Image (spheres, rainbow, N blue to C red):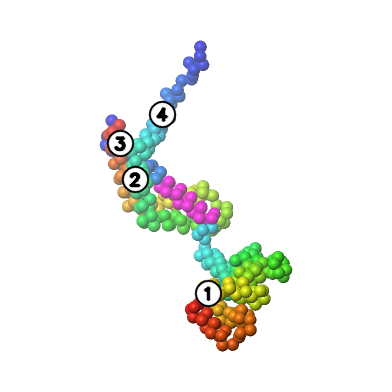
Amino acid sequence: MSGPDGNKSSHTELSSQVFFDLVDSVIADVASECHRVARLGLDRDLEVVEEELRFSVEARAKVADPSNNLETNTKFVVDIFGQTHPPVASEVFNCMNCGRQIVAGRFAPHLEKCMGKGRKARAKATRSTTAAAQNRNSRRSPNPRYSAYPNSVSENQLASGSPGVACEDCTVRENVKGG
Amino acid sequence: MKHSVNRPPTPDKDDAAEGFEKDEVTLREIINVKLVESGEKENLMELVRDRLVECGWKDEMRIACREHVKKKGRKDVTVDELIRVITPKGRASVPDSVKAELLNRIQNFIVSAALCV
């Protein structure tokens, strides 16, 4: 066997080689990382990075402004295709009940009035159609609010010629009952 | 006679000098294998990385890479090129304390490995 010195020198050389192998691995890591950063443009020159930052800030400002205006003015947002959000139904067609031209977005409220489903619509109906059935319906309904004007009118019609004090009493009673 | 019987003689016995070199390479390989198997290589790698980051060596290497990238242009750079550029500088600029610590540890390992063999 060789002496301890011989062993040491070969050991030293061997360990140097091993050590430099390790260092080479780390170097390869660093190089690979820098290469990736360089190719992806992640970490560029300070000047370039600042310039890009400025550009992106300007671009953001430009994008932000028009949409802000739109939102405050028109209550909807326009996207990149020109579509509005929320979507506005703007088609116009004829109502099958009354035959008038209606905007699609306003069709439901129109139908309420048109077909007599809402309370105001019903009030109109009592005036125009036969009084009796409509009046009875409106009197029996629990809603006290429309007891005033329409009921006084209907009371007049019911009484058929006894207006004045009697009717007023009736309306007052109606109001109390309803209240 | 089958062909397998007529295989040529193994070349190992031919040249003594070649054999000596091969012994060295084989020894290095043996140590490498022992390092990996025992997990010591992982420990050493981690130690080297930590030390080189602490002392700022890694940052110096990264700056050197960026310089080279600036010179060559972002799109033309290859990993091999970067390695080629920074290896000599990297090997030379390892701090002595780090080198000493690592060499010590490796030598201890080799001695203990040699004892086990």
Under circle 1, the secondary element is loop
Marks 4/2: CA distance?
A: 33 Å
Depth check: give the residue in front, B113 or A105: A105
Q: Are marks 4 and 2 in contact (CB under 8 Å)?
A: no
Say whether residue A78 is left or right of residue A34.
Answer: right
Disc 2 marks a residue whose amino acid type is: Asn
Residue matched to label 4:
B19
> Looking at the picture, do discs 3 and 4 lie on one chain?
yes
Eye-nearest disc, 1 or 4: 1
Which residue appears at 27% of the width and 34% of the height?
B115
Q: Residues within 10 Å of mark 1 (few under 14, many from 20)?
A: few
Residue A143 has which mark? 1
Marks 1/2: CA distance?
A: 85 Å
Say whether residue A176 is left or right of residue B29.
Answer: right
Under circle 4, the secondary element is helix
Q: Are marks 1 and 3 in contact (CB under 8 Å)?
A: no
Eye-nearest disc, 4 or 2: 2
Q: Residues within 10 Å of mark 2 (few under 14, many from 20)?
A: few
Residue matched to label 2:
B43
Q: Earlier in the sequence, mark 3 or mark 4?
A: 4
Disc 3 marks a residue whose amino acid type is: Ala
The image shows residue B73, relative to residue A109, as above or below, that is above
Residue matched to label 3:
B113
> Looking at the picture, do discs 1 and 2 lie on one chain?
no
Q: Earlier in the sequence, mark 2 or mark 3?
A: 2
The magenta stretch is A23-40
